[in-house]
Amino acid sequence: MMWSVVFLLTSALTLESYAVQDLYERLTHGRQLKIYLPKSAEKLEFIPAADHRKTFSYWEKGHHRITKGRVSGTGSDRRWYIDKVTYEDQGTYVQRDYWNKEISSVKVAVTPRFLNVKCVAGESLYIQLEGIDLSDAALSFSGEATNVTLVHDGARLSQNLPDYWDRVQTHTMKIEIRNVNHSDEGLYTLRDRSDRLVSVTRMDLTDHHESSEGNPLLALLLLLGVPAGICCCCRKKIFKKKASTAATFQANPQAVHPPPGGPVGPCPPYNTPGQPGAVYYHGPDPNMGPAVHPPQTPVQDSGTAPPPSDPRL
């Protein structure tokens, strides 16, 4: 009896341990974080990677106010989102049920983002803030002949640089470098207030943009345009053939639809062996006369009458 109880307790603990799922997410800075919330989930807690002693409640079932992020969907299709993750979102996200037991946990790590951008001379280069506030952004540039700081804590330092005066503009979600040229080729490094690397953007100049390369919308249009063009051409040919047939029918109806009894009118004459000069006409119409006509005596156009025959002969 005691062994049965021990076996049942061991099985229950084993099933409970299997119910807990540990997931790992590695996202680049500024990407979206999505966590699935099952029906049994009652709350979502966050333990930051910088301080494991702290716990924050981000979501709780039945409470309309969400501390951070947003919830989309209902029932079995319910998810919690952070649109753009930052280093502040690194840590462990724990889901708990009605009895405050852990259902699953998601450990999230954030990494810098690396980009390669090509611009045409005279265009603007845009550096996305990747989820951080403008007041926390610091942007520096490193090229072949210079290494300068353009923005620090959201403030423009480019106004003190002759080559960048009035060319750097700050926006809510991006930093703009206007009228780029060969001297602007290089690396643009974006950091947050804690001097953590957010993104590195390499800018190179190009003669023109190849917009058709890798464009899924253009490929779809081309794919749909080929069958449509074929159908259009075939339709034009069919209509042209029908118009030609109609014109022919109006000019000569029997040429398009011959009568069921066969062709009307005599066939071309021909000679039959043994009966020189005989002419045959084929056709089902009996009103056309005899099928065989006797040969006619050829008329001699010599100008001299034939000699009289001798009655004695």
Image (cartoon, grey):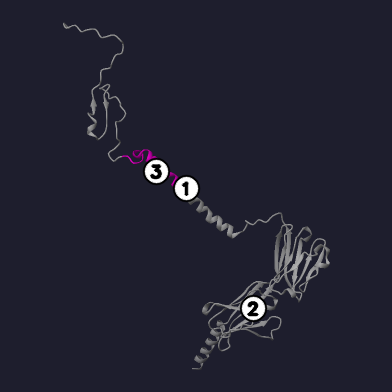
Q: Position of residue 269 (x, y in %)?
A: 30, 27
**Residue at the spot of label 3:** 246
Judging depth in this view, the residue of 93 and 252 nearest the camera is: 252
* Disc on res. 153: none
Q: Residues within 10 Å of mark 2 (few under 14, many from 20)?
A: some
Magenta span has 249? yes
Rounded to the nearest angstrom, the CA distance separating label 3 from label 2 is 76 Å
Q: Quadrant of residue 108?
A: bottom right
In this rendering, is residue 85 above or below 17? above
Q: Position of residue 106 (x, y in %)?
A: 62, 79
Judging depth in this view, the residue of 180 and 117 nearest the camera is: 180
Q: Earlier in the sequence, mark 3 or mark 2?
A: 2
Rounded to the nearest angstrom, the CA distance separating label 2 from label 1 is 63 Å
Q: Which residues are magenta?
A: 234-258
Q: Earlier in the sequence, mark 3 or mark 1?
A: 1
Viewed as shown, does residue 312 lie left or right of 180? left
* Disc on res. 107: 2
Q: Quadrant of residue 170?
A: bottom right
Q: Quadrant of residue 45?
A: bottom right
- Tell me if label 2 and label 1 are in contact, CB under 8 Å: no
Q: Earlier in the sequence, mark 2 or mark 1?
A: 2
Q: Secondary structure at mark 3?
A: helix
Outermost residue to the front: 250
Q: Amino acid at mark 2?
A: Lys
Q: Amino acid at mark 3?
A: Ala
**Residue at the spot of label 1:** 236
Q: Secondary structure at mark 1?
A: helix
Viewed as shown, does residue 65 lie left or right of 259? right
